[in-house]
Amino acid sequence: MDAINLMVEEHKNIKLMLKIVRKVSLDIMNGGEVNFNEFDKIIDFIRNYADKHHHKKEEDYLFNKMVEEIGPTAEKVVNQGMLVEHDWGRLFIRRLDEALKDLKEGKEEAKLDIVANAVGYTNLLKDHIHKEDNVIYNFARRQLKAETLEKINEECESFEEETIEEAKKYLDILTDLVKKYEIEMEE
């Protein structure tokens, strides 16, 4: 297994969900009703596939090794860049979830917060993924020792084996939403 290639592939799945989130947000802006069931699926996917499954590999395996082995440059990029953006993403999703609860309680203005946080999340993640795919991962490949990269591969492979069924559940959710919203698949 090439863990970095796997992370790039996972980014493709996450970008599909970002397209869905934008489409759902546009529907709301165009006067459509908020589909709470769809948002539950979206938030579940983001929290469990994008964050717990994908970001865990980055944070626990790749980024930690980068900071340990590469030093101050990696520490700055990881701790003041990538991890901060992961936390911002979590904040957008927490606020999105709160806004959905507010709307369920009849607070009509919460629609504004739903769209704002949903779109804020998509914009953040789109840029974040671009940086990881085109800068961070390449930096890691160039700077980490071959044995360190192999260790990351082994750790990620073990993690994948442990979580394969759960990951499949979220990919099934994604597939259903991609079909429903007629989203173009990434190449």
Image (cartoon, rainbow, N blue to C red):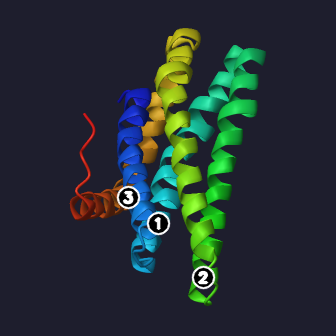
Q: How far apart are marks 1 and 2 (CA)?
A: 13 Å
Would you say the residues marked 1 and 3 are in contact, meaning their CB atoms lie under 8 Å apart? no
Q: Which of marks 1 and 3 is in front?
A: 1
Residue ID for mark 3:
23
Occupied quadrant, residue 157: top left
**Could you tell me which residue is drawn at 25 percent across and 58 percent down?**
175
Identify whether 107 is placed above or below 57. below
Q: Distance between the residues labelled 3 and 2?
A: 20 Å
Disc nearer the start of the sequence (1/2): 1
Residue ID for mark 1:
29
Question: Could you tell me residue 4's position as x and y percent?
Answer: 44, 28
Q: Which of 114 and 82 is in front in this view?
A: 114
Q: Nearer the viewer, residue 164 or 51?
A: 51
Question: At numbered mark 3, what does the secondary structure look like: helix, strand or loop?
Answer: helix
Occupied quadrant, residue 98: bottom right
Give the amino acid type for the residue marked by disc 1 in the picture: Met
Disc nearer the start of the sequence (3/2): 3
Identify whether 183 is placed above or below 125. below
Residue ID for mark 2:
108
Question: Could you tell me residue 38's position as x and y percent?
Answer: 39, 72
Identify whether 93 is placed above or below 61. below
Q: Quadrant of the C terminus?
A: top left
Question: At numbered mark 2, what does the secondary structure look like: helix, strand or loop?
Answer: loop
